[in-house]
Image (cartoon, helix red, strand yellow):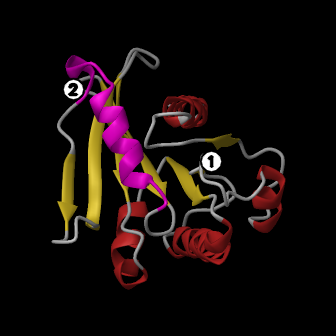
Amino acid sequence: MFINRRLRELNLKIVYYGPALSGKTTNLVYIYNHTRPELRGDLISLKTREDRTIFFDYLQLELGQIKGLKPKFNLYTVPGQVYYAASRKLVLQGADGVVFVADSQTYRMVDNVTSLQDMRGYLRELGIDPWSVPLVVQFNKRDLPDAAGVSTLRSLLRLNRSIPCLESVATEGAGVFDTLKTIINLVVSSVQKNI
């Protein structure tokens, strides 16, 4: 959280985290394409030749007011590929909230577990308590025939009942804005205590 008192702006950072090809960038692209231009900035993506995220994707949204301040929600994705670990840790720095995008396909379960464990480890290394950061888990790719059940995903990821979990099909937009609204509400509730 960064407050610019002169401009009456509150900058908040939400990071979309998860394994490679789980749908992080797809979420941001859908949000960008379905948000009024006056409420959003440009979608910035740093990609490889294979059209994979190399460092991060970034999108800024301006919504409402919080205690007389205009909030700017800065949405980031992290690269999912294992060899970009340093980039993932760097993008997590200063996160006010995290959306963990899990790939629902059965064969991706180990990738989901590893990615969530890595995220929590990076947060600890950054001096952030991984259990106190607002977190929403999005079970993406629910339309695929080999999607694991929600209870199986919750159990494998060891998610307690207090962590909101939403189902999505990001390519179609199903669950994308529900996930965004949920994490924004959690982040706003968290920062209101500290303003």
- Residue at far bottom of view: 83
| For marks 2 and 1 on the same chain, the one whose residue lies earlier in the sequence | 2
Say which residue label 2 marks: 6
Q: Which residues are magenta?
A: 22-40
Q: Residue at x 78, y 54 (%)?
A: 149
**137 in magenta:** no
Q: Residue at x 45, y 53 (%)?
A: 16
Quadrant of res 4? top left
**33 in magenta:** yes
Say which residue label 1 marks: 142
Quadrant of res 33? top left
Within 10 angstroms of label 2, few (less than 14), some, or many (20 or more) residues?
A: few
The picture places residue 34, in percent across and down from the top left corner, at 33, 25
Task: Say left or right for 49 vs 146.
Answer: left
- Work out whether residue 192 or residue 163 is closer to the camera in this orientation and state it: 163
Asked if residue 191 is positioned above or below residue 56 in the image, the reply reads above
Which mark is on residue 58?
A: none
Question: At label 1, which amino acid type do we have?
Answer: Arg
- Work out whether residue 29 or residue 100 is closer to the camera in this orientation and state it: 29
